[in-house]
Image (tube, rainbow, N blue to C red):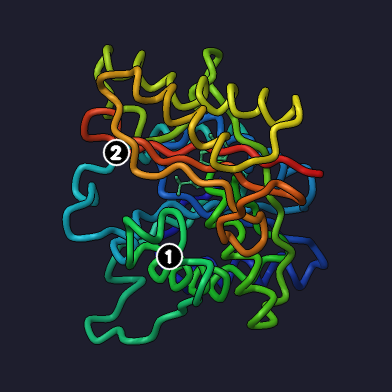
Amino acid sequence: MRVVKSVKEVRDAVKEWKAQGLSVGFVPTMGYLHEGHESLIKKAVKDNDRVVVSIFVNPMQFGPTEDLDKYPRDLERDSKLCENAGANLIFHPEKEEMYFEDFSSYVDINGLSDELCGKSRPIHFRGVCTVVTKLFNIVNPDRAYFGEKDAQQLAIIRRFVRDLNIDIEIIGCPIIREEDGLAKSSRNTYLSKEERQAALILSQSLNLAKDAINSGERNSSVVIDIISNSIKKEPLAKIDYIEVVDSLSMKPVKTIEKSVLVAIAVYIGKTRLIDNFTFNI
Ligand code: AMP
């Protein structure tokens, strides 16, 4: 497995593979990889002849008060995980390789990116869409893999790939959790021992909501109250949002009549965590 830093090196490698008729899978990440990322890489390895993983903490998707500088990084550990999972190439660019000083072109998406995380992170999805488009143009894969952990991101990527006729198949992969239910995230490393325990409230509250919906509850505000009442019992938790939205449009729904995403964002101390589940009718 090779680790490269330049756009040209990635392009040359992928061109050579494609000239041999090999298929290419792509897994974009911000690094500090865990079993969630690993599951995406393994799926890509299963589906494709060659796999590229990008590791880039994209400054454009972080707001001014967010955790860009303290975001965890460990390329050596990440390289081992990628190699063991069967990846062929890591693209690990410096920020200067991705953004010219006078960079001024953006990919933005209306509507979908204003809901949920877009409300508290207003520039986030413009940064995500722009960097993912750039990475798609650099890697030129046949398929790209994204986690359902970031369900809104996945819906947005599916939408702009469709809208802009990007010829890449987007594959969503299920959320990987710790044994006690906490969704795996690079940001879990920020949590103190007490906060790590308190963070269980996210998956526990979602499970209560899932039970209620499975038992026939169809009123979104009742579902939201169930989650809210449960989270409020945890003193270290502060709710950012709890929403029941249409799985495709990300617009809130009053009554659960078709496929919905139940999504939450909760601060545990200073760390903002997200979790969700989809209910299909
Ligand atoms: P990140 O490095 O956080 O930008 O994540 C890179 C990719 O890994 C995204 O598509 C995420 O949705 C996915 N991912 C992160 N955590 C998980 C998880 N616990 N389960 C499944 N996929 C995940």
Q: Which mark is residue 263?
A: none
Depth check: 174 or 9 in front?
Answer: 174
Q: Look at mark 1 in the image and give the residue it sits on.
A: 125
Mark 2 residue's CB less than 8 Å from ligand 1: no
| Type of amino acid at the residue the image marks with label 1 | Phe
Q: Quadrant of residue 186?
A: top left
Residue density around tag 2, few if under 14, some if 14–19, many if 20 or more, within 10 Å: some
Asked which quadrant contains residue 179, the reply is top right
- Vertical relation: 127 (above or below) 243: below
Residue at the (53%, 48%) spot, across then down: 150
In this view, 49 is above or below 106: above
Seen at 39% across and 55% down, the residue is: 56
Regarding mark 1 in the picture, which secondary structure is present there?
Answer: helix
Which quadrant holds the N terminus?
Answer: top right
- Residue 174 locus on image (x, y percent): 67, 38
Taking 173 as reference, is 51 above or below it? Answer: below
Q: Quadrant of the C terminus?
A: top right
- Tell me, for residue 72, which label it has, or none: 2
Return the x and y of residue 185 as percentages of the image width and height. 44, 34
